């Protein structure tokens, strides 16, 4: 399990606190570069893993992917680093994983921060048909620059595009195209799609003990399985302008910050506004 451990660069504002950053399904730990730099300057130690199956970590040909397993791997990493309490910040699939982590290890997760997380609704309960692993694998094998950019432009960036977004598209393309690991990577990606579709966290928000912040770009329309769902089901899915508010009510000690013009990746689409909101919360209510 590859990871980065970034020390605080601000001794005058040292918080003696740690934040672990959990990446999404179409992302790597490296995608957190901007966030990590800002948090380090703000006095935090930052741990940034690549989950098993992703990026620089092992891509096992036979592995039982579950949110619980990935959460346990993450806990083991923190234990190996001697970290006994941490803020947990997750984006997309990483937000779903962060939620599961906080549910499993409330003594470790002092604060939970999720940015446009997956899992705010149970897609299969809303009518998304189950898809076999073989079918999902075929989808992954067909992935290329064009398909990745088309999806990210529509979902992450509200149909806008800047040249700097290409960095993250090309990062993903290299994983799909670099032999020999790409074949196993594609299968692992099919497995993680099945994982997030079949392992909901939406029914357990009321059990979260950590103080929580939801950072939501309300133009997001992400929904796992929407692409192969019938039109009447598609119409019900991925309404983050509603899901953020509904989820904030379900979590006992939660704050909600919405970005009404941003999509699935507000930390990339408007870095200044996103990080101002994040750091403001950490400096204020986040320390309570």
Image (cartoon, rainbow, N blue to C red):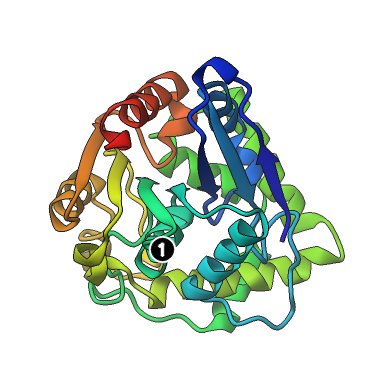
- Residue 28 seen in this snapshot: no
Q: Residue visible at 65% across and 33% down?
A: 7
Asked whether 179 or 18 is in front, the reply is 18
Q: Is residue 235 above or below residue 43?
A: below
For the residue pair 12 and 193, the one nearer the viewer reads as 12
Q: Which SS class for mark 1?
A: helix
Res 277 visible? yes
Give how far across and how far down residue 267 sits, in percent: 45, 32
Question: Where is residue 13 shown, x and y percent of the image?
Answer: 50, 19
Horizontal and vertical percent position of residue 270: 43, 24
- In-front residue for pair 205/86: 86
Left or right, residue 283 beside residue 45: left
Q: Quadrant of the C terminus?
A: top left
Residue at the far top: name it.
12
The residue lying at 20 percent from left, 60 percent from top is 236
| Residue, disc 1 | 227
Q: Residue furthest right?
A: 180
Locate the N terminus and report the quarter of the image it occupies: bottom right
Q: How many marks?
A: 1
Left or right for 263, reference 212 = right
Q: Is residue 191 left or right of residue 186?
A: left
Q: Position of residue 172 (x, y in %)?
A: 67, 49
Question: In the image, 23: left or right of 240?
Answer: right
Label 1 packing within 10 angstroms: few (<14), some (14-19), many (20+): few
Give the residue at x 19% y 56%. 251
Query: At x 43% / y 19%, what residue is drawn?
Result: 272
Q: Nearer the viewer, residue 265 or 283?
A: 283
């Amino acid at each position: 399990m590859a990871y980065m451990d970034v020390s605080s660069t601000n001794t005058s504002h040292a918080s003696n606190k740690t934040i672990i950053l959990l990446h999404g399904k179409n992302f790597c730990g490296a995608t957190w570069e901007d966030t990590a730099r800002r948090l380090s300057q703000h006095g935090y130690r930052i741990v940034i893993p690549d989950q098993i199956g992703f990026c620089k970590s092992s891509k096992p040909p036979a592995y039982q992917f579950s949110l619980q397993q990935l959460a346990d791997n993450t806990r083991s990493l923190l234990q190996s680093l001697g970290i006994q309490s941490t803020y947990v910040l997750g984006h997309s699939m990483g937000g779903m994983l962060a939620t599961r982590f906080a549910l499993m290890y409330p003594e470790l997760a002092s604060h939970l921060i999720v940015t446009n997380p997956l899992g705010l609704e149970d897609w299969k309960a809303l009518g998304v048909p189950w898809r076999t692993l073989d079918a999902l694998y075929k989808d992954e094998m067909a992935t290329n620059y064009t398909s990745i950019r088309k999806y990210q432009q529509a979902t992450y960036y509200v149909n806008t595009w800047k040249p700097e977004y290409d960095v993250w598209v090309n990062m993903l393309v290299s994983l799909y195209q670099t032999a020999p690991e790409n074949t196993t990577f594609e299968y692992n990606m099919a497995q993680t799609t099945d994982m997030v579709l079949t392992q909901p966290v939406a029914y357990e928000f009321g059990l979260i003990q950590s103080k929580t912040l939801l950072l939501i770009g309300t133009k997001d329309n992400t929904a796992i399985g929407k692409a192969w769902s019938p039109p009447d089901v598609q119409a019900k899915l991925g309404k983050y302008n509603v899901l953020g508010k509904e989820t904030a009510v379900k979590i006992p000690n939660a704050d909600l910050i919405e970005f009404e013009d941003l999509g699935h990746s507000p930390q990339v689409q408007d870095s200044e506004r996103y990080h101002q909101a994040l750091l403001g919360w950490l400096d204020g209510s986040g320390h309570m």
